[in-house]
Amino acid sequence: MIAYALRSETPADPPAIRALITQAFAGAEHSSGTEAAIVDALRARGELILSLLAEQDGRLIGHVAFSPVAIDDGTSGWYGLGPVAVAPDRQGAGVGVALIEAGLARLRQAGAGGCVVLGDPGYYARFGFAHDATLRYEGAPAEYFMALTFDGGRPQGAVSYSVAFEASDTARD
Ligand SMILES: CC(C)(COP(=O)(O)OP(=O)(O)OC[C@H]1O[C@@H](n2cnc3c(N)ncnc32)[C@H](O)[C@@H]1OP(=O)(O)O)[C@@H](O)C(=O)NCCC(=O)NCCS
């Protein structure tokens, strides 16, 4: 166990967030190499609706982003989880789980309908995420796209993330 605190992003945090995400994804299997740029683009578009940090002794060791998604059937109030990143030397200590649980709790408290995630089912099932055949995401194997409803609603159709997810250039402050 390591001691750390969770808090929301402040205006001073983006450079450290960018560095952390770049470092965390450098050795990741399914990395596009654009994860830091995506978070910058979400912020620039006002779509980084939740940006949570884990901090240990003043050092940023983890980050998770949430942004709105669009669903074909017109359902609103759903969000996408990701990217999530934990500093390589702090991985496997529960920081990722704590960040995601805190983020999901905040979304739920704020009245969100649900959340989707694209990732490893072995990791995300613990939060209640499950593949739902009625919700589709083009371009990824179906079982890797998972949903978690907060209000019992079951939206249907194709899901799209913000165009910020197409970002490939890291913006400078
Ligand atoms: C994925 C990541 C965010 C997890 O954070 P973490 O703090 O290391 O994970 P935690 O310690 O909270 O979770 C530990 C559990 O998750 C499992 N786990 C960690 N990474 C996993 C992965 N990529 N796939 C499946 N399970 C994983 C561990 O085995 C452990 O399982 P257990 O509780 O059953 O023992 C972190 O490893 C990371 O930043 N990786 C590089 C970037 C990345 O791949 N991000 C996810 C894609 S958006």
Image: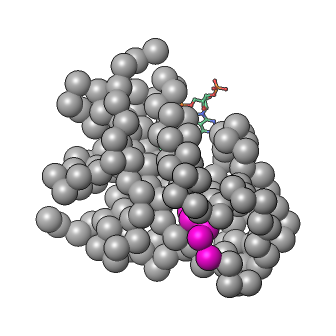
Report whether 70 appears left or right of 132: left
- Give the residues in magenta: 76-80
User: Residue 77 in magenta?
Assistant: yes
Picture quarter with the C terminus: bottom left
Report whether 143 appears left or right of 64: right
Give the image location of residue 59, x and y in percent.
Answer: 23, 32
Q: Nearer the viewer, residue 2 or 28?
A: 2
Report whether 168 appears left or right of 32: left
Q: Is residue 36 visible?
A: yes
Q: Is residue 23 visible?
A: no
Report whether 57 appears left or right of 156: left
Q: Who's the residue at 77% across and 66% down the image?
A: 153
Q: Does 92 sit above or below residue 156?
A: above
Overall secondary structure of the magenta section: strand
User: Residue 6 in magenta?
Assistant: no
Q: Who's the residue at 50% across and 41% down the image?
A: 102
To which quarter of the image does residue 44 belong? bottom left
Q: Does 32 sit above or below residue 1?
A: below
